[in-house]
Image: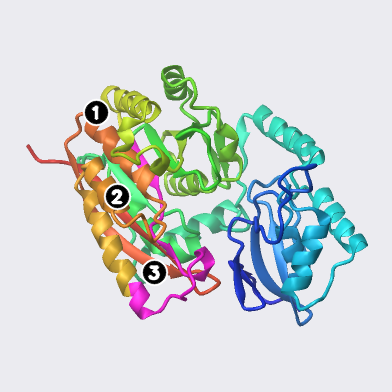
Amino acid sequence: MTSAPRYYNAAKAKGRVVESSAGMIILGRKDAEGPDYPRLRRVEAFVTEVEGEEMVCLSDPEGIARDVVALSPPAFLAASLLDGKNSPAAVRAACAKAFGGHEITGAELAGLVERLDSSFLLDSSSFRLERARVLGAWMDNPVRSATSAGASYPGEPGELGEWLKGFFSAEGGPGWLENANPARPPARGLIAPHIDFARGGPVYAWAHRRILESPLPPLVVVLGVAHAPSTEPFALTTKDFDTPCGTVENDREAAGQLAEACGWITGDEPLHRMEHSVEFQAVWLKALNPGREFRILPILCGDFSRYAKDGSPMNEPRIAGAVEALARLVRERKVLVLASVDLAHVGPDFGDEKPVDEEVSRRVGTRDGEILEAAASGDPDLLWTEGMKDGNINKVDALSAAWTLSAVLRKAGVAATGTVLAYGQAPAPGGGMVSFGAVSYENQAP
């Protein structure tokens, strides 16, 4: 009997807390020089119970390894020590010390390495060959498949549509809109969540009701979040997006213009393969807007904090160039800029020791309110300064995409300010919490 999994953030060994959120724990002696040893890739880990025993499961956020590998706590510690520098003897010694003398034999360690390698969880030649095969096949397909269909949301069109509409009338929802107002101008920008629909549905509904209230612009620039590590500040894909309700077409004319202006911007395109933040908006847009013609420009935003240590992200030439190119689209065409983001990520699921209680929830709500107020100002640098003033201690993943939304509108000469439509907090499986909101940016009255 398997219990519901909870995310795994730390392993306790002889009273020591060993962080595992990055999937790379380095204990024991490192050889200063010598041959390369097996190295665990960046993985995600969570704990589950199998037949009364606690097991640590490893999964691949990149999606190259499709299977989840379940390990005993000693095996997990051994796996986490595989950093490419620790020798087998150092791994075995560290495990023996951590578990009161229980020693992993050389044969057991070799078997563990073989299992991890065959599952493509080690950074090895077999993994690199498999990665090239998988990504090559993905790049050859002009359509990005709906990777979360049937898991995060229903895969059948009728069921999906009714489920999404139900969030409008659910507690905290805005109510269903029977008729659009063709005279009301569309919003210039929107912030919507990208948490799973079951937890954030009513707040999604607030953002997407604003889309339903007016004519839908023919181009929707969707700014998602690159949750996996990126090498560039933005990642554009030219692929269409499959959804249960049909394919959402990519505006390849706009994509071509952006790629021409920013030659580097498709370098991280494979990040779109497993990333859900653009997919979730495509699903809502397609399901709720049958018969309305629109295309999307799907862009993932990396972590801009590495580019803005001394001020605004605009100081990075690649970011400034992409903002200018997007602003040109906004000036020349009818465009909605939609940022698909969440706010705080706190609690044990995200590396914090303290579980979320009422005090933490209130503190996070107050801090989120300050960030949302800064976002609604329409001033990108005010938002960035506010979001980073505490070092982003609550791990808000919205900052880069929300900053881009505001920066693009301002660069385009759009005088728009935001209104916070809704805010929510949802529990995470291991005692943590994720927060999220909806903001609409409207033209200021002359």
- Please, what is the three-letter code of the amino acid marked with disc 1? Ala
The residue nearer to you, when weighing 93 against 133, is 93
- Amino acid type of the residue that numbered disc 3 sits on in the rendered structure: Ala
Q: x, y percentage for residue 202?
A: 38, 63
Residue that extends furthest to the top in the rendered view of this protein? 260
Quadrant of the frame with the N terminus: bottom right
Residue 82 x %, y %: 74, 54
Tell me the quarter of the image containing the C terminus: top left
* Magenta span: 336-361
* Residue farthest toward the right in the current orientation of the protein: 107
Q: Is residue 414 left or right of residue 140?
A: left
Report x, y in % for residue 27: 68, 61
| Residue 25 is inside the magenta segment | no
Magenta-colored stretch includes residue 340:
yes
Q: Are marks 1 and 3 in contact (CB under 8 Å)?
A: no
Q: Which residue is mark 2?
A: 210
Q: Under tag 1, what secondary structure?
A: loop
Taking 115 as reference, is 139 above or below it?
above
* Extreme residue in the left direction: 446
* Residues at marks 1 and 3, CA–CA distance in whole angstroms: 37 Å
SS label for mark 3: loop
Distance from the alpha carbon under mark 2 to that under mark 1: 22 Å
Q: Position of residue 40 (x, y in %)?
A: 72, 51
Residue that numbered label 1 is attached to: 412
